Amino acid sequence: MPEQAPTRLKIPISVLVVIHTPALEVLVLERADWPGFWQSVTGSIEHEGESLVQTAIREVREETGIDATLYPLADWQLQNRFEIFKKRRSRYAPGITHNLEHVFGLTVRERLDIVLAPSEHTACRWLPWREAAAACLSWSNRDAILLLPEKLAAHKTQAAQPQT
């Protein structure tokens, strides 16, 4: 059955937020409308005035119950342009076929209890980073998780730099 068009069309600019612990355990969520599709937190900007950081904070709260303002949220300065799955295109204006995704990392101190949005996800699990990457169907999500050790090391190096 084809998906019904939403009342408000989605903007083809989104965020991907890799939520992880310092021990490189990564939170993955199973989509409610796509059993077996595991992913990190994702979501589109709601309106042209919403910043990417605001979108990331909102999506993390909506999908997991986590207040991302309480933890380090890092813009990985990584963008992925990908073709929108055909079964999802009715959510966008006619002729829109690609999305621009911006990748963020959110470091939490330890595995947190997650409050899922049942309309979006049915399950969650914390996995070691390589297992989390292997569980993701999306290439951009998999590749982002595989960058986690490098991004976390770079963030620690930057944090240790003396401020001038």
Image: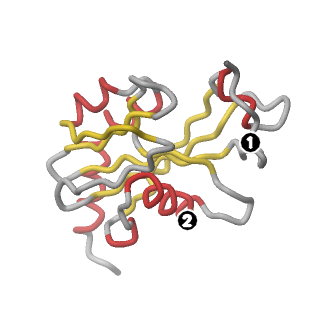
**Where is residue 147 drawn, in percent x and y?**
33, 38
Residue that appears at 38% across and 31% down: 38
The earlier-in-sequence mark between 2 and 1 is 1
**Where is residue 56 drawn, in percent x and y?**
50, 57
**Where is residue 69 drawn, in percent x and y?**
39, 71
Q: Indicate which disc residue 139 carries.
A: none
Residue position marked by numbered label 2 in the rendering:
54
- Label 1 Cα neighbours within 10 Å, binned few <14 / some 14-19 / many ≥20: few
Q: What SS does tag 1 mark? A: loop
- Location of residue 139 by image quarter: top left
The quarter in which the N terminus is drawn is top right
Q: Amino acid at mark 2?
A: Gln
Q: Indicate which disc residue 6 carries.
A: 1
Q: Amino acid at mark 1?
A: Pro
In front of the other: 61 or 68? 61
Left or right: 25, with 49 as reference point: left
Left or right: 139, with 82 as reference point: left
